[in-house]
Amino acid sequence: APAELRYDGKVVVVTGAGGGLGKQYALFFAERGASVVVNDLGGSFKGEGTSTKAADLVVNEIKSKGGKAVANYDSVEFGDRIIDTAVKAFGTVHILINNAGILRDISFKNMSDEDWDLIIKVHVTGSYKCAKAAWPYFRKQKYGRIINTASAAGLFGSFGQTNYSAAKLGMVGFTETLAKEGGKYNILSNVIAPIAASRMTQTVMPEEVLKNLKPEWVVPLVAVLVHDSNESENGSIFEVGAGHVSKIRWERAKGALLKTDDTMTPSAVIKKWPQVNDFSKPEYPTGPADFLGLLEAAGAQGPNEQGEPIDFKDKVVIV
Ligand code: NAI
């Protein structure tokens, strides 16, 4: 069996670490030798109010077991202050777990701009601000590990959660691009869609289900992804919970090539609908350029005015 994974000398920032999943991450990394910044705003699960208590309790628990931790009470919207806390207390930051989150569930029909804005602010802007402030340290030391937190609600949609779904799938795109930009500097970013019993889920699931969704069971995957021994897993999406871990990826159907002449009509799309939806020979694209490869493979290079084939790869920018 491999030796126990350790995090001695590492500085770990965990946002929203006053409860739920964040608390479990903080306790774990402190127990395994890391110095931990326990960030928590201490508000309700709907994002109301603030308190220093949530973070303090976790810091006290870590210290009572001989671990190293400091509290930070800022909202993740002020991620620079959270990273400052890490730098002042421990000199730098190596690992960032963007975990803080809230819910404002309501049908789309009844959603207010406040419900929308607050969710985007905490999840998307909060994760951005923390990563942005940590990035210069990661770059300088050629080492960084980021975990962002998505949700099945973002991957698949979920009733009453248009705001949360938009924010959570935003975490996927954010992670995929951070991975592409950070990879060559040994900054590895991955995103998880967890499921766990917490105050966030305790009102929506029965007790016997919650018993099998221990937040501690999400920690091992995160621990592996942010460890030194992970040198290549980057930009990946994982579903994790109830003791189960699996990777998620994009799948593209075979598709159909419509000729780019006067047959390029809506009825041509209808005619090729079966191919558009044909997943019998799927592809698994990992970058925008993969679509251009598909065009090439399908022989889509039409001739230019000089009658030469057009090389899409050099000419097309996908935005
Ligand atoms: P939780 O409510 O127990 O923990 C979230 C923590 O974040 C709380 O301690 C809260 O005070 C803190 N927080 C909220 N807003 C903050 C802010 N602006 N700045 C700093 N801290 C803030 O919830 P849980 O379940 O542990 O959720 C953790 C993450 O996992 C969240 O991002 C959540 O959206 C995500 N998630 C959880 C799922 C689950 O099944 N529990 C499912 C899918 C995603």
Image (cartoon, rainbow, N blue to C red):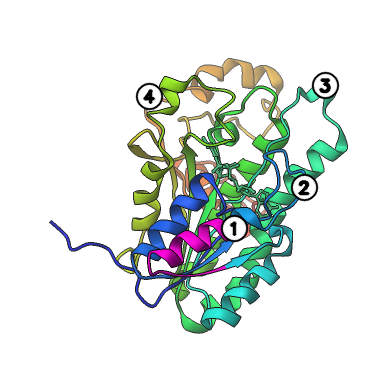
Mark 3–mark 1 CB contact (< 8 Å): no
- Of the residues shown, which amino acid type is indicated by label 2? Gly
| Cα gap from disc 2 to disc 4, whole angstroms | 51 Å
Q: Circle 1: is it few (<14), some (14-19), or many (20+) Cα within 10 Å?
A: many
Which span of residues is magenta-colored?
56-70
Residue 65 colored in magenta in the image? yes
What residue is shown with label 2? 49
The label nearer to you, 4 versus 3, is 3
Residue 258 colored in magenta in the image? no
What residue is shown with label 3? 109
What residue is shown with label 4? 280
| Cα gap from disc 4 to disc 1, whole angstroms | 50 Å
- Mark 1 sits near ligand 1, with its Cβ under 8 Å away: no
Residue 277 x/y as whole percent: 51, 22
Q: Earlier in the sequence, mark 2 or mark 1?
A: 2
The image shows residue 95, relative to residue 175, as above or below, that is below
Q: Earlier in the sequence, mark 4 or mark 1?
A: 1
| Cα gap from disc 2 to disc 1, whole angstroms | 14 Å
- Of the residues shown, which amino acid type is indicated by label 1? Ala
Overall secondary structure of the magenta section: helix
- Of the residues shown, which amino acid type is indicated by label 3? Lys
Farthest residue, direction front: 64
What residue is shown with label 1? 55
| Cα gap from disc 4 to disc 3, whole angstroms | 37 Å
Q: Earlier in the sequence, mark 2 or mark 3?
A: 2
